Amino acid sequence: MSSLGTSPPCAASQRIAAPWREALAARLADYVELTKPRIAVMVLVTVSVGFALAGDGRVDLVRLAHALVGIGLVAGGSSALNQWLERTTDARMPRTADRPLPSGRLAPAEVLCFGLAAAAAGIAWLLALVNVATAVLALATLGLYVLGYTPLKRATTLCTAVGAVPGALPPVLGWAAATGEAGGGAWLLFAILFLWQFPHFLAIAWLYREQYRRAGLRMLPGGEGGARVAGFLCVGYALALVPVSLLPAQQAVAGSAYALAALVLGAGYVAAAARFLFRESAETARGLLWASLVYLPVLLLTMTWDHFQLLK
């Protein structure tokens, strides 16, 4: 029997275990943060769209699940390796200074090992359980993002164009996972995502331009006049996106309902870009950013829905 004022052994054990559980949970949360989960979710959504559109109305859910696991591992590994390479510049910017590496919560060596292991596991998973084409495309996406886009951010404003390539490849990976090759429809999806990214990322670059400048990252074109050039680029890419977004309807990937949605969404995207061009401010830049975040998922979901309506 316990003496008065003495806790039972189980209660003492719980008090000892609680800090350990909290530390483990915090560490796991840091590893999850390394994978940039919001970006990973968007990647997997676009992979799923590419996979669904490649088929004839039947979706192999087992193969799709394997594709999502493998590509998710590669995406998470890519994000971790990106943060390992950018740990010094991340420490200079308030928006990234609290990430696991610059804050000191994780060590560079463990992040490097995690990133390499996750990416390697993802490639191996795709090779073993999906197909060679998807594994090769995933490896190319990893290389372009980590070895191309990431170091170029310190050297040239063309990094955005380079980074838009791996950013547009996920639906191509999904298409290849379903069919074993990247068909014409896959490259239509690639073109849409490629053009969509420029207003999206230039709005972000404008909002954080001072932080990027202090960190030595060249994200906006044109030096001191870069903001105005960015506005013209946003409008130009948003305008180019309108006819390109209509190509899936012309190629029978989707139908007239999708074409109407693409026109409406495209007009809204152009309007948000023009508003930013003519009145540059945090409000209009955020408005363009939100327009981009509405545009893409609504467009892709409408395309997928209309595709299956055509197959009925």
Image: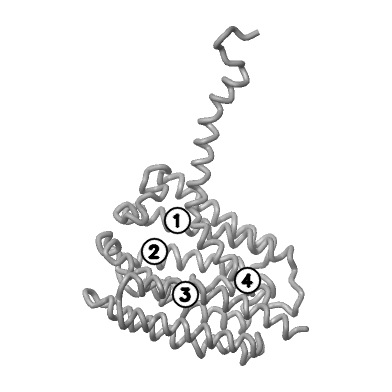
Residue 201: percent from left, percent from top: 40, 71
Whichever of callouts 4 and 2 sits on the residue coming sooner in the sequence is 2
| Residue hosting label 1 | 81
Q: Is mark 2 on a helix, strand or loop?
A: helix
Q: Nearer the viewer, residue 263 or 33?
A: 263
Q: Is residue 211 left or right of residue 235?
A: left
Amino acid at pointer 2: Thr
* Numbered circle sitting on residue 150: 2
Q: Do the residues labelled 2 and 3 touch (CB within 8 Å)?
A: no
| Residue hosting label 3 | 292
Amino acid at pointer 1: Leu
- Residue at x 42%, y 47% (from the top left corner): 100
Q: What element carries label 3?
A: helix
- Residue at x 57%, y 83% (from the top left corner): 188
- Quadrant location of residue 250? bottom right
Q: Are marks 2 and 1 in contact (CB under 8 Å)?
A: yes
Foreground: disc 3 or disc 4: 3
Q: Do the residues labelled 1 and 3 touch (CB within 8 Å)?
A: no
* Residue 71 vertical placement versus 184 (above, below): above
Q: How would you rate the neighbour count of disc 3 (Cα within 10 Å): few for under 14, some for 14-19, many for 20 or more?
A: many
Whichever of callouts 2 and 3 sits on the residue coming sooner in the sequence is 2
In space, the residues marked 4 and 1 are separated at their CA atoms by: 23 Å
In space, the residues marked 2 and 3 are separated at their CA atoms by: 22 Å
Residue 30: percent from left, percent from top: 48, 46
Quadrant location of the C terminus in the rendered image: bottom right
| Residue hosting label 4 | 174
Q: Is mark 1 on a helix, strand or loop?
A: helix
* Numbered circle sitting on residue 251: none
The residue most toward the bottom is: 250
Q: Is mark 4 on a helix, strand or loop?
A: helix
